[in-house]
Image: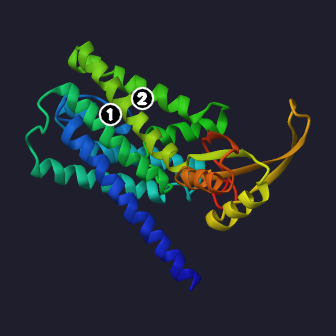
């Protein structure tokens, strides 16, 4: 039974990942490539090779990533790249098919193509990351460097991507197209963050009320969330008081407000968005 659940969970993860990879391929093949823009990562390298020589992007994308994967397996270990290998070949397949069936640019204006393409690609990569996948490329370079040097992977990726985008100037001799590349890169990164942070964001709520016991019981039973009671003292009144602290998902905030309003409409509530929460009921620590 446990094995069946594990297989089912893995298949579901790969299915969701495949959707994300298809969305990413749509952004790259239908918007970014027709706009003649070099974005970051291996996709940007493959695009630069295509614009310079006409060599199909799907083949150079596979080739560069395979070289990086061989290096990664040798340095980081054999268990590194199962989902990454899957992503690389699926993206190459999707891009090849899309470029066969759709030959005309969908958006005629290059700048709009870069923005839309970056947003769609970022959405797709965000979905892939949520499933623990990777599209390879500069991610691999960052992980290898991070193993030997105390350098944040995000900084390495940003530097690599910036160099790749800047190289487009030597292909097109156009500052405008180079800047379009940076617009694509930042749009893509921003959309990835929206997907990842939006999925994980939780809210820490502090409730000050004389009816703390009823409110705490209602949060525990209705939302199945943990509640902590802190000892406090009102500095003005000098009276002791209880403070309810609970962390809930952003979708549960309004329910907490309704609970408090029904029990004690004069209660004082303070809430703050938190980026990530680890532990039971939330994300597991990696």
Q: Choose between 265 and 231: the one closer to the eye.
A: 265
Residue 114 placement: quadrant: top left
Residue occupying the point 51% across, 82% down: 4
Of mark 2 and mark 1, the one earlier in the sequence is 1
Q: Report whether 254 appears left or right of 41.
A: right
Question: How many numbered dots are placed on residues in this image?
Answer: 2
Q: Position of residue 83 (x, y in %)?
A: 45, 58
21 above or below 55? below
User: How crowded is the residue under tag 2: few (<14 C-alpha within 10 Å), some, or many (20+)?
Assistant: many
Q: Choose between 35 and 246: the one closer to the eye.
A: 246
Q: Label 2: state its secondary structure.
A: helix
172 above or below 96? above
Q: Report whether 239 appears left or right of 12.
A: right
Q: Position of residue 52 (x, y in %)?
A: 20, 28
Q: Position of residue 236 (x, y in %)?
A: 86, 29
Q: Label 1: state its secondary structure.
A: helix
Label 1 near label 2: C-beta < 8 Å?
yes
Q: Position of residue 36 (x, y in %)?
A: 20, 29
Residue occupying the point 8% across, 40% down: 104
The residue that label 2 is drawn on is 161
Q: Choose between 127 and 164: the one closer to the eye.
A: 127
50 above or below 21? above
The residue that label 1 is drawn on is 44
Residue occupying the point 79% across, 50% down: 210
Q: Report whether 12 appears left or right of 19.
A: right
């Amino acid at each position: 039974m446990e094995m069946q659940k594990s297989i089912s969970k893995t298949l579901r993860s790969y299915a969701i990942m495949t959707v994300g990879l298809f969305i990413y391929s749509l952004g790259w093949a239908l918007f970014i490539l027709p706009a003649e823009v070099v974005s970051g990562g291996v996709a940007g390298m493959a695009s630069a090779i295509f614009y310079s020589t006409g060599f199909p992007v799907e083949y150079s994308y596979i080739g560069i990533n395979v070289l990086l994967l061989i290096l990664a397996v040798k340095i980081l270990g054999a268990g590194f790249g199962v989902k990454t290998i899957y992503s690389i070949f699926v993206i190459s397949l999707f891009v090849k098919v899309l470029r066969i069936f759709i030959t005309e640019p969908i958006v005629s204006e290059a700048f709009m193509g870069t923005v839309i393409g970056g947003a769609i690609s970022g959405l797709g990569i965000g979905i892939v990351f949520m499933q623990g996948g990777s599209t390879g490329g500069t991610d691999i370079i960052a992980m290898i460097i991070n193993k030997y040097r105390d350098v944040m992977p995000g900084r390495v990726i940003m530097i690599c991507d910036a160099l790749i985008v800047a190289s487009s100037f030597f292909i097109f001799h156009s500052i405008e197209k180079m800047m379009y590349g940076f617009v694509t890169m930042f749009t893509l990164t921003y959309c990835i963050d929206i997907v990842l942070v939006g999925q994980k964001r939780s809210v820490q709520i502090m409730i000050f009320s004389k009816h703390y016991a009823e409110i705490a019981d209602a949060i525990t039973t209705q939302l199945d969330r943990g509640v902590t009671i802190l000892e406090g003292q009102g500095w003005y009144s000098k009276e002791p008081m209880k403070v309810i602290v609970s962390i809930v998902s952003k979708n549960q905030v309004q329910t907490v407000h309704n609970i408090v309003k029904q029990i004690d409409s004069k209660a004082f509530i303070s809430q703050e968005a938190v980026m990530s929460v680890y532990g039971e009921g939330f994300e597991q620590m990696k």
